[in-house]
Amino acid sequence: QELLDSSVESDSELSMFIAGMFQGSMSLVNDVAKEFQSALGFPIEKCISSGEASELLEEDGGFKVIAERILTAYDAGEFPDGSSDDHAAEWKAWVKALGKETKRKGKKLFHPIRLALTGKMSGPDVGQVVKLLHMTEGVAPDRVSLKERIDTLREVAAKS
């Protein structure tokens, strides 16, 4: 709770979303705080420099293609930014269309999306992270916003 602005009630829609989002990855209630804080961060440069994402950065690894599509969709206002009440369905449809457009599926689709939007190689559902970023606007001071992630992704994609 201390990770959020004090105005957020423990039984609020946001609190319930957070609890549901991390339910499967926690063994103790205190684990939620760690997972929540991790989801709000965006360590893409650290992940890349560690070599952990090297396979995705190879020519056929898909990162550059997926990053470019994400940036194009965001710039065109077509990226599902978490603001919709039906975000889960919009996210699923967007990812499916992206897969068809790039002829990628499974890990070849989802891993580059994860790296591009979370800066990590593993973690909670990326669509839920995008929704969480929208829901925590103004109440989670340490979060890296979607816009900040896109700006960083633009810089990283230009280098790769």
Image (tube, rainbow, N blue to C red):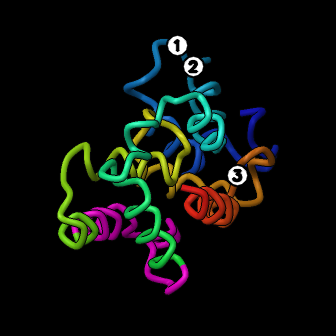
- Residue ID for mark 2: 31
Verify CB contact (< 8 Å) between mark 1 and mark 3.
no
Residue 48 drawn above or below residue 103: above
Instruction: Determine the residue positioned at 71% across, 48% down.
Output: 143
From the image, state whether disc 3 or disc 2 is nearer to you: 3
**Residue 91 painted magenta:** yes
Which quadrant would residue 2 be assigned to in this image? top right
Q: Nearer the viewer, mark 1 or mark 3?
A: 3
Q: Say which label, 3 or 2, has the lower sequence index.
A: 2
Question: Real-space Cα distance between discs 3 and 2?
Answer: 20 Å
Q: Magenta stretch: residue 62 in it?
A: no
Q: Amino acid at mark 2?
A: Asp
Q: Which residue in the structure is indicated by mark 1?
A: 28
Q: Report if residue 41 is visible in the image.
A: yes
Look at the numbered disc 1 and give the secondary structure of its residue: loop
Q: Which residues are magenta?
A: 75-96
The one nearer the camera, 77 or 160, is: 160
CB atoms of marks 2 and 1 within 8 Å: yes
Front residue of 138 and 126:
126
Query: To which quarter of the image does residue 94 belong?
Result: bottom left
Which mark sits nearer the N-terminus, 1 or 3? 1
- Distance, label 1 to label 3, CA atoms, is 25 Å
Numbered tag placed on residue 144 in the rendering: 3
In the image, what residue occupies the spot 67% across and 58% down? 152
The answer to whether residue 20 of the structure is visible from this angle is no
- Front one among 11 and 124: 124
Marks 2/1: CA–CA distance: 5 Å
